[in-house]
Image: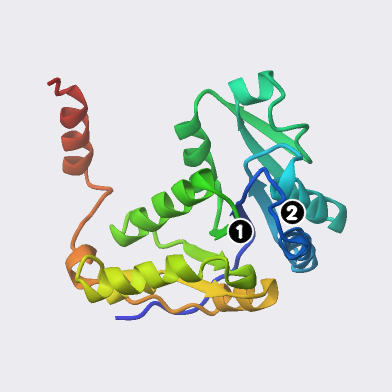
Amino acid sequence: MACSPSHHIRNICVFDGSSPGKEKEFLESTNHLGQVLAERKIHLMYGGGSLGLMGGVSIAVFFGGSQVLGVVPKDLAKEDIIGKTIGEELQVPIMSDRLNAMFNHADAFISLLGGLGTLEKIFHIFYWAQLHIHHKLIGLLNVNGFYDNLLSFLDQAVKQEFLTSSAQQIIISAATAEQLIDQLQSFISVIDPSMSRINWSTKESRKKFRLDLSLRL
């Protein structure tokens, strides 16, 4: 079963590193992504600050004329660990609140280049999509084959039956910003029938969640 490809992306959340990385193409591609988002009148959410690739994409979007919102845990902002946020800044109490704020306000997610924090966030969003908690768009900007090994891992997970092929197709990969945005906007998702039976919004689901939270080991 396919969903209609009628995706109007207004706000994109970009996950990327606070380091510029080793290769000059990393920062160049990051700046170019920001320019493409601004040209297409797409607003940016990101992890805040002005360091590395996080700073590069936010500066490009901001000076390109689109809105920028950095979501920053208060302790990071207080200690000035990540530099001054470009655009508007939303401070949240803890890291999980940061991801929840991004999730609630973004129409789509792009993973640029980065380390553990970048991977943790994109896989969190990916897992929620696999469980049909949401149907938002997810993309990898695969600059210079940076994510080739990750994509091979997903192929292996499907081959060994730890991941379904429909779940694997949730993540879209492209080498350039233009290709990735075009593919996100025209994406047709494949619904997993077993997961589509889950209704996360029912009263019973919310009740069970409250009960689970009350359990103590």
Closest to the observer, 201 or 73: 73
Mark 2 crowdedness (10 Å alpha carbons): few <14, some 14-19, many ≥20: many
Q: Is residue 113 left or right of residue 87?
A: left
At 75% from the left and 32% from the top, the residue drawn is 83
Q: Quadrant of the C terminus?
A: top left
- Helix, strand or loop under label 1: loop
Indicate the quadrant where residue 12 lies.
bottom right
At 77% from the left and 51% from the top, the residue drawn is 56
For label 1, the residue is: 112
At 67% from the left and 43% from the top, the residue drawn is 18
For label 2, the residue is: 57
Q: Quadrant of the N terminus?
A: bottom left
Q: Is residue 178 left or right of residue 120?
A: right
Q: Amino acid at mark 2?
A: Val
Residue 80 visible in rendering: yes
Q: Badges 2 and 1: C-beta atoms under 8 Å apart?
A: yes
Residue 66 visible in rendering: no
Q: Amino acid at mark 1?
A: Leu
